């Protein structure tokens, strides 16, 4: 009987020991090769300070002004570098690194068509956003004169053959560019009775215009303003 009780006690103790081991493993966890290593707060702080002196990948370093180029990247132009236009374009690029001649020219083409359509249809709202106050005043007076006379301008842009920057310069903080537009247009002016008093609605004519645009390089507004027009026709 005594031996049976001792055997029974051993079983009870083994069960208790197993229970305690399970509790400990739940509390302490097991090392499975994926847990982080031991971290020494004081050593990590010292190491972080040393790495901070050498540079840390988790820290965004402010750019060193000494590393910034003194000038904007040179322009890729198919013209002589001694040409005044190239000099002017470079000056504009220095004042406004986001400036690009090709992008500007594409925008000028769109403005050319919008302004022609706005003038012929009397769309003052569109014109006001694209013209300088002086140019808008001239356009507005011409539109008003037509309206008073009951005249209708029919001006159709058939095609834009070319658009080339022919002048470029900085005027203080303002970029100033003149573009030569060569286009094909149909233009006719009718009186109040519908009779043609100028132009020919059945004839396509070549028109050469020189339009000057300007933009304040300090402004966050990327749009250019038409400040002058001249035509050879």
Image: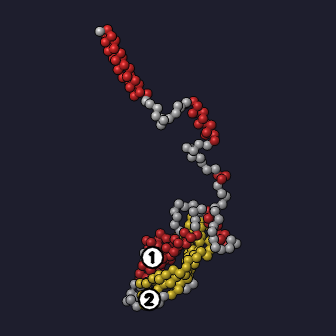
The picture places residue 42, in percent across and down from the top left corner, at: 57, 30
Q: Is residue 2 left or right of residue 87?
A: left
Q: Which residue is mark 2?
A: 201
Give 127 or 41, whichever is nearer the viewer. Answer: 41
Instruction: Identify which residue is drawn at 62% across, 66% down.
Output: 92
Residue 224 seen in the figure: yes
For label 1, the crowd category at 10 Å Cα-Cα, with few meaning under 14, some 14 to 19 and many 20 or more, is some
The picture places residue 158, in percent across and down from the top left corner, at: 47, 83
Q: Is residue 50 above or below residue 17?
A: below
The picture places residue 90, in percent across and down from the top left corner, at: 64, 67
Quadrant of residue 95 within the rendered picture: bottom right
SS assignment at label 2: loop
CB atoms of marks 1 and 2 within 8 Å = no
The first of marks 1 and 2 along the sequence is 1
Q: Residue furthest top?
A: 2
Q: Is residue 21 above or below residue 158?
A: above
Residue 144 seen in the figure: no
Q: Residue furthest right?
A: 82
Instruction: Identify which residue is drawn at 59% across, 47% down.
Output: 61
SS assignment at label 1: helix
Q: Which residue is mark 1?
A: 118
Q: Quadrant of the N terminus?
A: top left
């Amino acid at each position: 009987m005594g031996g049976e009780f001792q055997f029974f006690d051993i079983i009870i103790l083994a069960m208790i020991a197993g229970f305690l081991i399970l509790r400990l493993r739940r509390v302490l966890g097991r090392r499975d090769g994926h847990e982080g290593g031991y971290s020494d707060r004081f050593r990590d702080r010292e190491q972080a300070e040393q790495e901070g002196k050498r540079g840390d990948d988790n820290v965004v370093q402010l750019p060193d002004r000494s590393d910034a180029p003194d000038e904007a990247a040179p322009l890729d132009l198919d013209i002589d570098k001694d040409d005044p236009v190239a000099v002017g374009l470079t000056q504009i690029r220095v004042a406004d690194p986001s400036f690009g001649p090709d992008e500007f020219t594409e925008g000028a083409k769109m403005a050319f068509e919008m302004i022609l359509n706005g003038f012929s249809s009397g769309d003052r709202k569109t014109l006001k956003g694209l013209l300088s106050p002086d140019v808008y005043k001239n356009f507005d007076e011409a539109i008003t004169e037509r309206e008073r006379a009951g005249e209708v301008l029919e001006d159709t842009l058939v095609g834009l053959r070319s658009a080339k920057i022919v002048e470029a310069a900085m005027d203080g903080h303002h970029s100033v560019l003149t573009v030569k537009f060569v286009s094909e247009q149909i233009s006719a002016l009718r009186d109040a009775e519908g009779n043609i008093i100028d132009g020919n609605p059945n004839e396509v004519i070549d028109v050469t215009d020189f339009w000057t645009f300007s933009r304040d390089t300090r402004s966050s507004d990327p749009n250019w303003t038409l400040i002058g027009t001249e035509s050879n026709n």
